Image (tube, rainbow, N blue to C red):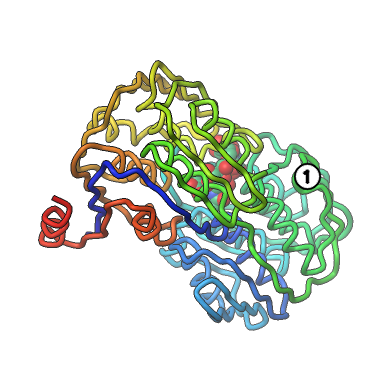
Amino acid sequence: MEQYAIKGGNPLVGEVEIGGAKNAALGILAASIMTDETVVIENVPDVRDTNVMMKAIESIGGIVEGIDRHTVKISGKTINDVVIEDGFIKKIRASYYLLGALLGKYKRAQVTLPGGCNIGLRPIDQHIKGFRALGADVRIEHGLIIAEAERLRGSHIYLDVVTVGATIDIMMAAVMAEGQTIIENAAKEPHVVDVANFLNSMGAVIKGAGTDVIRIKGVPRLHGTEYVIIPDQIEAGTFMFAAAVTKGDVTVKNVIPKHLESISAKLIEVGCEVEESDDAVRVVAAKPLTHTHVKTLPYPGFPTDMQPQITVALGLSRGTSIVTESIFENRFKYVDELTRMGANIKVEGNTAIIDGVNKYTGASISAPDLRAGAALVIAGLAAEGMTTVDDIQFIERGYEDFHIKLKNLGAQIEKVACEREQKKFRLKTG
Ligand code: EPZ
């Protein structure tokens, strides 16, 4: 099994290019099959989750053609099946987007119940509630979600919780429904807006994405388009916190600074300098980090997908910090691993109480999920000595060339496949 070997201690310095947003790409790839015309999508991150989504589209007869590493041409014209039940699709949570896309276009879909990162209970009741409100019959049989409708009719849907997945999924199912759909208490994340913009570029009529009320006027059909996916807010935030934790100076390029405001605000609170320009943000960590409190919230609040990264930083700050996770109930599993590196963190329910320590020390640790895995790598970059991180397949779900980008910023990190390679790395880095 591959792992990252890390020799900590180098401050990260330099510039890093941020790729396309994984969670926008997953919605957009699924939505691309909703027309029989060709769709070209640029800035698709080359990560495991997007590759699984493209494989799923091929498995039902869609044509996916790679133009270059980040550009794909997709045709849904040849789709001959609405059943997606192969084991591989279970690996990604976003398989539910194929349900909304297929139901919207063909009025029927059967998709394996989604899996994804194990960060807590991840119900899909709000997706189902939305599809039912549009007139679909939805049931779960033999591990499949089956959704069928004679016709879909616009409806007024009030979401009980703010959910990114259900907002996007219902939006896709509603774009070709008859009449108007209103989604209230909708999620406002940048990727919700990006999927709406993509669908509008295909001829959909969606208004209000980015606010908590989205209005969709059904159209008979969608057409082909060319579209560029927005930059990844969480990849950018991860490198910004990597700069903070390693006392570095990093400019993240190709970003939308507005999407990073809650992250920049916390970095400033803990003592970093943050400089924004049109499409870049520079983080300089010249002073020791200070403590703060943070609670994860739906956008524009502090993202749950940045919770492990900020915890790693607060673990090295002066004083006591409190981190409250309000989105997923099981997102502190990595704390045990961080404790093995010397962190002083106590978790009570959805709260972590962090007493800052002067340093982390290298250890052999495992990535429990995608974002926690990335956060542990950052801890390793700051730690004294050698760290090895196992289960990096989780990290590769959502970060393209993570170790290469870190290496280009001066990190001592290598992907190793066996003991011999690990030894070689140890010898090389002293
Ligand atoms: C998306 O997950 C992202 N995944 C997650 O990113 C991200 O952490 C999350 O949104 C929150 O921003 C993708 O986009 C593929 P939700 P999703 O529906 O859609 C509850 C990453 O690291 N809920 O917004 O599954 C749910 O339990 C991943 O990239 C219901 O109760 O999240 C949670 O408490 C991890 N019923 C809250 O809503 C439902 O039907 C928000 O979940 C749906 C959700």
Q: Quadrant of the N terminus?
A: bottom left
Task: Tell me the amino acid under the disc marked 1.
Answer: Ile
Answer yes or no: disc 1 within 8 Å of ligand 1.
no
Q: Residue at x 37, y 58 (%)?
A: 408
Instruction: Name, please, the residue furthest toward the right.
Output: 179
Q: Is residue 312 above or below residue 242?
A: above
Quarter of the image where one finds residue 285 = top left
Instruction: Name, please, the residue furthest toward the top.
Output: 319
- Identify residue for label 1: 183
Question: How many numbered callouts?
Answer: 1
Q: Residue 242: horizontal and vertical position, in percent?
A: 41, 42
Q: Residue at x 69, y 47 (%)?
A: 167
* Label 1 environment density (alpha carbons within 10 Å; few <14, some 14–19, many ≥20): many
Q: Is residue 96 visible?
A: no
Q: Residue at x 40, y 26 (%)?
A: 288
| The image quadrant in which ligand 1 is located | top right
What element does badge 1 sit on? Answer: strand
Q: Residue 311: horizontal and vertical position, in percent?
A: 41, 31
Q: Residue at x 67, y 63 (%)?
A: 101
132 or 326, which is in the foreground? 326
Q: Is residue 204 above or below residue 4?
A: below
Instruction: Name, please, the residue furthest toward the front.
Output: 286
261 or 74, which is in the foreground? 261
Quarter of the image where one finds residue 343 = top left
Q: Residue 152: horizontal and vertical position, in percent?
A: 79, 59
Q: Is residue 326 visible?
A: yes
197 on left or right of 28: right
Q: Residue 212: horizontal and vertical position, in percent?
A: 76, 39
